[in-house]
Image (cartoon, helix red, strand yellow):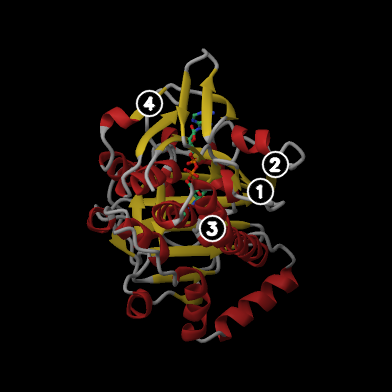
Amino acid sequence: MVGTAVVVGGGIGGLAAAIGLRRIGWEIRVVERAPVLEDAGAGISLAANGLRALDELGVGEAVRSAARGQYSGGTRTPAGGWLTRMDGALLEKAVGTPIVGIPRATLHRLLREALPAEALLIGYDAGAVRQTAPGRVRVEDGRGDVLEADLVVAADGIGSRIRSGLFPAHPGPVHSGSTVLRALTEEAVDLRTDFELTWGRGAEFGHIAFHDGRAEWHAVLSLPAGTRFPDPLAELRRRFHDWHDPIPALLDATRPEAVLHHDIGELRTPLPSYAVGRIALLGDAAHAMTPHLGQGACQALEDAVTLAAALATAPTTEAALARYDAERRPRSQAVARAARQAGRMGQRLTHPVAVGLRNTAMRLTPSRTATRMILRHHAWTPPRLR
Ligand code: FAD
């Protein structure tokens, strides 16, 4: 079955959905409210499930060659002791690839380049989305600019206006209790590992090394929503000055204006459906989760491939969307629950006794067991699009 679709949102999820739909022969339009198409984050890690989805979308190779395999590293205490070691080679053996790290801007560019320029419409702020008979959906922006299609994909992110229109009784996103400051270093940094997370009490610092030697770092702090600092980099230097190397060095390698600061939200109340009529919800619009497992974008990529595969094979759009909902909702909501739990046991833990018990349990966990736990989320086989 082929048709026309409007994808609302030009983030990782929306672009991936558009690529998937084009691959099965659909005509697509991506509308993005921002005046330029880009991703505002710093860096991102992609696990095997996300990479496999990208393979199915035809961009896996390009992403792999711009990314860096995360072979070494693990989780540490602020004094530098190791709680777990990451074994990228073991992951590679089990699922064919280590986790990879890539600047978000690069990933976003590679996805954009897989679409024809004329399919992307920027500065279009989608407002009302309405079903019109028979089997058509209408999207309208504030200026009365109307688009009509057989399908609308709502990939408009955590604050999705389409979601709140479809589910007016749903409470929407909530503050997770944490805020994140992050940046890309200005230049290459001499790092001994590809990837690290360090857990203090109510605070996490992590880095991901990139292909060109630069790195992204992030600091997650348990703080009320809206907390902001006059000089974020100075505040982080104050909070992390006595944490192990290379944390102070990463902060030193960063320009103050490069630091981004966002509160972390999540869709704590799961949605009852990812499809309403001829509208499919995808990515953060459907299942915004905390970043503690690095799975939000990977799940959006899984959504994109699953949606395209369902549309390619189901007899009607409605049947395809029912299948998409049935396949994606249980898995993505389980990953979101696991991410919240990982945050509770990691960065958000503050009581010294609980921190001590957790650290002991982690030190005693064999690396094969830790790898098996990771694989629960990473091992995913995409449906074939071709
Ligand atoms: P978004 O990226 O939010 O895109 C939505 C787009 O829709 C935006 O461009 C927005 O401008 C547009 N839009 C909104 N409303 C409208 C409208 N009305 N009309 C038109 N356009 C509209 N995931 C991983 O897999 N690995 C990681 O390592 C990882 N790290 C993370 C670290 C942090 C600190 C955070 C916060 C998240 C992390 N994630 C990670 C999660 C990941 O960033 C998100 O899940 C992913 O980017 C969601 O993509 P999306 O396209 O669904 O939404």
> Which quadrant of the figure has residue 7?
top left
**Location of mark 3 (residue):** 323
| Above or below 34: residue 236 | below
Q: Residues within 10 Å of mark 4 (few under 14, many from 20)?
A: many
Q: Nearer the viewer, residue 105 or 229?
A: 105
Check the picture and name the quadrant holding the C terminus: bottom left
Amino acid type at mark 2:
Gly
Label 3: element kind: helix
Q: Disc 3 and disc 4: Cα gap in Å? A: 29 Å
Furthest residue in direction right, as rendered:
169
Label 3 residue near ligand 1, CB within 8 Å: no
Q: How many marks?
A: 4
Amino acid type at mark 3:
Arg
Q: Is residue 241 visible?
A: no
Residues at marks 2 and 1 touching, judged by CB atoms closer than 8 Å: yes
Label 1: element kind: loop
Residues at marks 2 and 3 touching, judged by CB atoms closer than 8 Å: no
Q: Earlier in the sequence, mark 2 or mark 1?
A: 2
Q: Where residue 37 sits: x, y (%)?
A: 37, 31
| Above or below 112: residue 130 | above
Amino acid type at mark 1:
Leu
**Location of mark 2 (residue):** 172
**Location of mark 1 (residue):** 267
